[in-house]
Amino acid sequence: MPKATKITHPSAKFENKSRAFAFDDKCEHAHIGRCSSYWTLADDRKCISELTIDRSSNIFETYFFSKIGLENLTATQLFDMVKSGHLQYDHDDSIQFAVRSVKDDVGNIFWAVEVLIANSIKLIRKRPPFFEFYEGVDVPQAFRWSALKGYMDAQRNGIPFLLIEGETGSPTWKDSDTHRIVPIGSEAALIEKLKEKPTTLPITDYTSHNLGVIDARDLSRPFNHTTYHPAKHWPV
């Protein structure tokens, strides 16, 4: 009896996808970032995701995986497929999701499961999203959700800049680098703060430095790579 041919499910390729990084008359959802790797779902197909935000600070994570063999699943069954790729996917009972069919850059067809994971007040999916920017230098992985929340607070409160300060840890003591966000009220004050500490990563243990600047002045622009600047690139 011949062996059954194993189906190879393609991974979504969106390198040429058009994305919006600021709100305008034609854009109600702007892109924040994308997952740094992929999930393997229950039947071994790969799943990637992208994060977007709307004007009301609702944050969505959209998961993409091959539609082959899943053409007749319901929206709830497709959401269950997403959850099958995670060790845990705890969420409020009020979580909302929608599904649609999309093509990637090379014409393969995928399910897109868009899940409302957070709003301006709270996380709806319990685990904060892990994401990376589409371009440029990124903020530290474990610090990105805090930076995103800090950015939204700054825009609500009219704070123009956020400075990310860091302190190196110590490999000897297995201490990791730490970071904190400092609100800055003007560009002049920002420049003074940048002059106080190095803007390159020190090689010594437990040494303070300025890591990056988040520019929150443009209210049409949510937190993404267009708002973040390495401290060493900010003109002083």
Image (spheres, grey):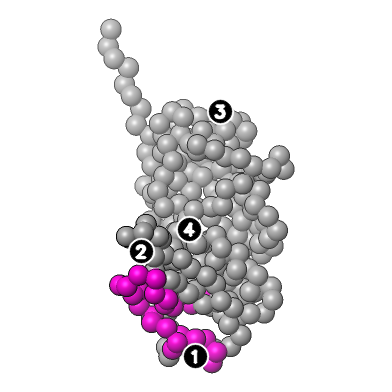
Please name the residue shown 48% across and 44% down the image: 64
Please name the residue shown 49% across and 53% down the image: 130
Please name the residue shown 32% across and 17% down the image: 4
Q: Nearer the viewer, residue 44 or 12?
A: 44
Upstream in the sequence, badge 3 or badge 1? 3
Q: Give yes or no for residue 184 being in the magenta stretch.
A: no
Q: Which mark is residue 170?
A: 2
In contact (CB < 8 Å): disc 2 and disc 1: no
Q: Find residue 95 and report its image quarter.
A: top right
Q: State the residue position of label 1.
A: 192
Left or right: 175 as drawn, with respect to 91: left
SS at mark 1? helix
SS at mark 2? loop
In front: label 3 or label 2: 2
Q: State the residue position of label 3.
A: 72
Please name the residue shown 68% across and 60% down the image: 120
In contact (CB < 8 Å): disc 3 and disc 2: no
In front: label 3 or label 1: 1
Task: Tell me the kind of residue under disc 1.
Answer: Glu
Task: Tell me the kind of residue under disc 2.
Answer: Ser
Upstream in the sequence, badge 2 or badge 4? 4
Q: Which residues are magenta?
A: 188-214
